[in-house]
Amino acid sequence: MGTLRRHGPIGAVCGLAAAAVLAAFLLLIAILLAEAWPVLDPGFLVDAPSRFADRAGVGPALAGTLWISFLTAAIAFPTGLGTAVYLEEYAPRTRMTGAIESTIANLAGVPAVVYGVVGLALFARGLGLGASILAGGCTLAALALPTVIVASRSAIRAVPKGLRIAAYGLGATRWQVIRHQILPAAAPGVLTGCCLALTRAMGEAAPLLVIGAAAFITFAPGAPGDPLTSLPTQVFAWTARSQEDFAALAAGACVALLLVLLAINLVALAVRHRLRGVKR
Amino acid sequence: MNISASGTGPDAAALSADGLSVRFGSKTALSEVSLSIPRGRVVSIIGPSGCGKTTLLRCFNRMNELIPGAVTTGTVCFNGVDLHGEGVDPVEVRRRIGMVFQQATLFPKSVFDNVAFGPRASGYTGDLHVLAEDVLTAAGLWSEVAEDLDAPAMELSAGQRQRLCIARTLALKPDILLMDEPTSALDPTATARIEATIHALKSDHTIVIATHKRRQAARLSDLTAYLDQGELLEYGPTETLFTNPRRRRTEYYLTGRIS
């Protein structure tokens, strides 16, 4: 009622929408935690999956997800940012670059499972990486790449034109303009885009299942060549089982996945905060 | 190609344009402009908005080529070298011929970093603090910022920003200073301060200033060029042009019948 009086009918409807989103989010967390409660203990994060639900944990899957995220970031971020810088600052406006641009935009909308098929053919079979962590990282990097490029390009394009002109006018070379003006100004936007792409990619199960992620790995992967496993594929494997205990395990794995996402977002937040501090 | 060789006398041309034309796509912005800017003088370029003042100014340090679709023909000679010639590096040109833009766009950094950007970019080896004090003094800003050079430049007032832009350009130690409507966004007090700065810079700089303020041109410059629809209609000593214009369009412009 107070909202209606203060903000009018449109404001009240918008406020209602916001409240619904908040409620849905809280409900999601509550259901997850309630489902996962029986399995949540410190050992759960390090134990290996087991035939016996009460002994199972997400150790290998968690390690796999961390490995895959690292590889995805290491491959997709530099490649994507480099592509964005090239397209915005170096490439002449020709039909060729126009075609590249629209291809990238379209790739961002391709379903994840399609990337899985490409990853299977290209990385797992073609390059002989098999169903490994590295093949998974490469596949998810390919999935994340278009989003990184599109977000980085719009961040670069949003840099005020005057900044470019001023830097060029002061006798800076193209690289100096990019390095000292454009990249610092675009950094927060680039970071947001990278974060979004990474968190979306690491939540994908389908492409990794297509490559051949294993659901039953008893040791944590320690190198890129180790067998592929991840939290989302673990969730999928556990939900496919009929025993009720495994539903709790799946919910527990989801909680672990959300914790990783939260950690990544916190790191991004801290970096963004630092960037803003440096700018002053 | 080296553009710094210079053995010319005091009254020689610092810059001379010959048959200079600029097209943006199919639109002609400048057609067949020829003029010579004597060393150590202040030259104003006046004319109705859209007449090509900015475009002409930007030809002098090759800024137009940053605009996609811009085509420049003709020559601009500086120290006997055609600036648009083969082998001339536009970066080197912009370091020798500095420019102050209409919009005072500062870098989102400290006052000091703004001044130091150009020298750092060109690999200046001297003491940056000494240089900063010199150019900030020349731009009439030193007393206002000396206390805290590390303060964010964005916190300066509009007039101070423009003077910082002038200081930033002076830090390149350019041979020629180009100024594109440096006071168009400022109030009368700030404008007066900028004009005082330009007056002070006159003694040891060649300055080309594009302005739509007729009286500013009259106050500041030794020579005035009148541009109209991309053509140079008249060019001569400021006093002659203002009191006794040869062309009717010039007279119309000066008396405010066209703007």
Image (cartoon, coloured by chain):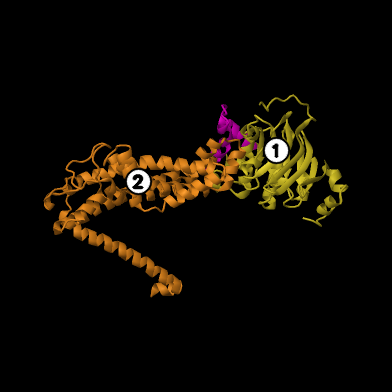
Chain colours: A orange, B yellow
Local SS, label 1: loop
Using the image, tell me which numbered label, if any, was put on residue A217. none
Residue B60 circle label: 1
Does residue A259 appear left or right of residue B224 in this picture?
A: left
> Going 44% across and 44% down the picture, which residue do you hit?
A275
In the rendered structure, the residue with mark 1 lies on which chain?
Answer: B
For label 2, the crowd category at 10 Å Cα-Cα, with few meaning under 14, some 14 to 19 and many 20 or more, is some
In the foreground, A188 or A275: A188
Rendered location of residue A145, percent (x, y): 40, 46
Q: Secondary structure at mark 2?
A: helix
Q: Which residue is mark 2?
A: A118
Residue B55: horizontal and vertical position, in percent?
Answer: 70, 44
| Mark 1 residue type | Phe
Find residue B197 and report its image quarter: top right
Q: Which dot, 2 or 1, sits closer to the camera?
A: 2
Asked if residue A186 shows in the view, the reply is yes
Q: Report the amino acid beneath label 2.
A: Val
As drawn, A205 above or below A77: below
- In the rendered image, is residue A280 in sight? no
Image quarter (top left, top right, bottom left or bottom right) of the C terminus of chain B: bottom right
